[in-house]
Image (tube, rainbow, N blue to C red):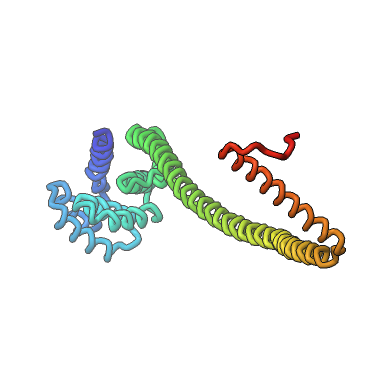
């Protein structure tokens, strides 16, 4: 809303100068095309006024007043004619026209840059206008408005840049974090593979050690078993040899003892038989 108001003010000031743009007596008297253009511009017949000013510019190419009025007609034809209007105002400002014409040309250039939101350039042209025509309140007003708009614009640009930097930093942070995560993951996988290979090597070494340890034990066990078997065979052989080597006297004693055991058994048996039939025993029972 405020922006629209400022634009209206600027346009109002432009119109104010456009009324005075054809107030020079020498223009009305020396050039009929300029005189006709001023009359048409006053009636707001801007296209016809522009045609008249174009003819006057060909006849008087160095007259700043003609270019100033031509720029006013172009400005009134719409935004699409702003660039052409600025060219006309620039020709007027660079001419040898009187100071009031130069001041109005700089002022209209300031308004055109203001309309394009190039507030820095607008401020420069408003300052030139005030230098050429000090005390012009309309120019001073537009100058102050342009300064305020420039300050707001810079603040907004700074804010936008900070937001962009934060966004870029966030994206770079995410990328760096993802990269760090990937590197950590790769390192972890490599470490796991190394640990697995190390564990497999340790298991194989333990298995080999166990096999090496079991091998002597089994061998010792087999040797002990073979030794025991050999000892048993030796014992049996030794007994057989002892039996074969026993003297005849010992064999006779064993035969006698066996006979006595037999006689003793027969004696007891006969004695028991006699008792059973009632025959007294003739043998004394010790």
Image coordinates for residue 262, horizontal then vertical, percent: 70, 51
Question: Toward the viewer: 124 or 64?
Answer: 124
Image coordinates for residue 255, horizontal then vertical, percent: 77, 58
Q: How many numbered marks does the figure carry?
A: 0
Q: Quadrant of residue 234?
A: bottom right
Residue 28 visible in rendering: no
Compared with 25, 281 (above or below) is above
Q: Quadrant of residue 248?
A: bottom right
Image coordinates for residue 177, horizontal then vertical, percent: 50, 49
Residue 154 shown left or right of residue 255 in the figure: left
Question: Toward the viewer: 254 or 162?
Answer: 254
Residue 266 shown left or right of residue 277 in the figure: right
Residue 122 shown left or right of residue 60 in the figure: right
Q: Quadrant of residue 211?
A: bottom right
Which quadrant: the C terminus? Answer: top right
Residue drawn where x is 30% and y is 56% of the image? 83
Which quadrant: the N terminus? Answer: top left
Compared with 143, 52 (above or below) is below
Residue drawn where x is 31% and y is 56% of the image? 88
Residue drawn where x is 38% and y is 52% of the image? 93
Residue 63 visible in rendering: yes
Image coordinates for residue 76, horizontal then vertical, percent: 20, 50
Question: Toward the viewer: 40 or 72?
Answer: 72
């Amino acid at each position: 809303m405020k922006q629209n108001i400022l634009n209206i003010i600027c346009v109002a000031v432009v119109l104010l100068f456009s009324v005075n743009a054809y107030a020079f007596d020498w223009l009305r008297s020396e050039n009929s095309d300029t005189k006709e253009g001023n009359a048409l511009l006053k009636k707001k017949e801007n296209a016809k006024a522009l045609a008249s000013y174009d003819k006057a510019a060909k006849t008087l190419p160095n007259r700043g007043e003609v270019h100033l009025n031509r720029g006013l007609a172009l400005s009134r034809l719409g935004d699409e004619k702003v660039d052409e209007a600025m060219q006309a105002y620039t020709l007027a400002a660079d001419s040898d026209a009187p100071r009031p014409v130069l001041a109005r040309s700089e002022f209209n250039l300031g308004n055109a840059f203001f309309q394009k939101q190039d507030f820095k350039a607008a401020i420069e042209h408003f300052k030139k206008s005030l230098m050429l025509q000090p005390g012009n309140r309309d120019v001073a007003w537009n100058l102050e408005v342009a300064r305020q708009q420039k300050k707001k614009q810079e603040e907004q640009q700074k804010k936008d840049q900070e937001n962009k930097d934060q966004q870029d930093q966030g994206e770079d942070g995410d990328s760096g974090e993802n990269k760090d995560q990937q590197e950590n993951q790769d390192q972890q996988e490599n470490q796991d593979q190394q640990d697995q290979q190390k564990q497999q090597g340790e298991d194989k070494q333990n298995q080999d050690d166990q096999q090496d340890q079991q091998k002597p034990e089994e061998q010792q066990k087999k040797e002990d078993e073979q030794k025991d078997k050999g000892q048993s065979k030796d014992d049996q052989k030794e007994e057989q040899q002892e039996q074969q080597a026993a003297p005849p006297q010992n064999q006779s004693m064993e035969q006698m003892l066996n006979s006595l055991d037999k006689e003793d058994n027969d004696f007891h048996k006969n004695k028991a038989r006699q008792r059973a039939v009632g025959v007294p025993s003739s043998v004394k029972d010790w």
